[in-house]
Image (tube, grey):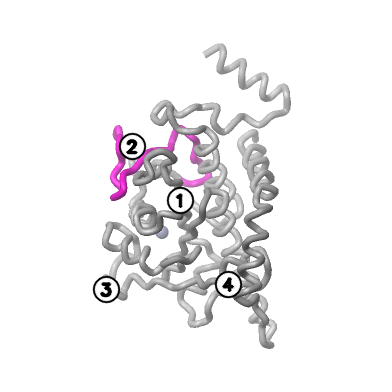
Amino acid sequence: MFHRIAAVLVSLCLGLAFPLHAQAPAALPDLPPALLEDIVTGSRVLADFGVLDGFGHVSARHPTNPKHFLMSRSLAPALVSAEDIMEFDEDGNPVDARGRNVFLERFIHAEIYKARPDVMAVVHTHSPGVIPFTVSKTPLRPLYHNPSFLAAGAPIWDIAGEFGATDMLVRNNAIGHSLAQALGDKSVVLMRGHGDVTVGGAVKIAVFRAYYTDVNARLQAQAIGLGSEVTYLSAEEGAKADATNLAVIDRIWDLWKRRVQALSAK
Ligand SMILES: [Zn+2]
C-alpha cells in the first residue's frame, strides 16, 4: 500500500498523469500494458469528444490468441480502466467472467473479428452526428482528407431486413453476423436508427475512424445545408489520403493519450 501511495505522490509531484496501466490488471497479466492502455485511451477520448456517451465500446483482437478479443466489462466508456478489460472467445463469451457484467452488444465485435482477419480493433458508437445518415437516403461521403476512408463506402445495415421489429440491439451472434456481412471489406458500417461501427488494423486506427466519421457527418450536414452542390473526395483521392493519414496517425494518437492522461489527473 505504501509503495502505491508513494508512486501516486511521485507522479503528482512530477506533474505526470497517473499512468493508465498503473493499476495493472490482475486478471490479464500476460497482455501488453500498451494494448490495454490503447483500449482505455480510445474509450475515454471518444467519450470526451461526445462520440461515445454512456454507451458504446472499444475492443482489440487478442494479440496471441487471434480468435479471442479484449474489451471492457459493462461500463460507461469514460470510466474504463485497464483492470476492467476482459477476454472474450470467438462467440463473445467471457473467458473468465468472475461475476462481472458484460456488454449486451459484444456480438458486434465477436462476429467482425470472425469475418475479418485483418481487423485488429473495433469501435461501436451511437454518435449523434452519424445517426441522421443512418436513416437518410443521403450517403455519408468524405468532405475532406481526414475521413478519407469513407471514400471506399459507408454501407447502411438495417437490422429489420433480416430480423424484423427488434429493440435495435445486436444481442446475439446471428445479428452480429448479419452486421459483419454488411460491413464487408469496408472500414465503417452505419446501423439504421442506432449508430455505427468502425474497424482498423490497430486500436488507434479504429478510434480515429470513429472520431472522423462523426466529424465528417456533422460537416457534411452543414455543407448540404449551404444549398449548392457538394464536391466530395473521389475514390482515388480517398485512397491516397487514407494512406497518408495512417502514416502520421501517431501524432494525433499521442495527443489523445495526453488528453486522457490530463483528464485522469483531474
Ligand atoms: Zn449500440
Question: Looking at the image, is mark 2 or mark 1 nearer the viewer?
Answer: 1
Residue 200's x, y, as percent?
A: 51, 55
Nearer the N terminus, badge 1 or badge 4? 1
Q: Residue furthest right?
A: 14
Query: Above or below — where is 68 with respect to 149?
Result: above
Q: Are marks 2 and 1 in contact (CB under 8 Å)?
A: no
Nearer the N terminus, badge 1 or badge 3? 1
Q: Which residue in the protein does label 1 denote?
A: 57
Disc 1 secondary structure class: strand
Tell me which residue sits at (66%, 63%) in the image. 146
Disc 3 secondary structure class: loop
Nearer the N terminus, badge 2 or badge 1? 1
Nearer the N terminus, badge 2 or badge 4? 2
- Quadrant housing residue 210: bottom right
Nearer the N terminus, badge 3 or badge 4? 4
The segment highlighted magenta reads 76-100
Instruction: Check disc 3 and give the amino acid type.
Output: Gly
Q: How many marks?
A: 4
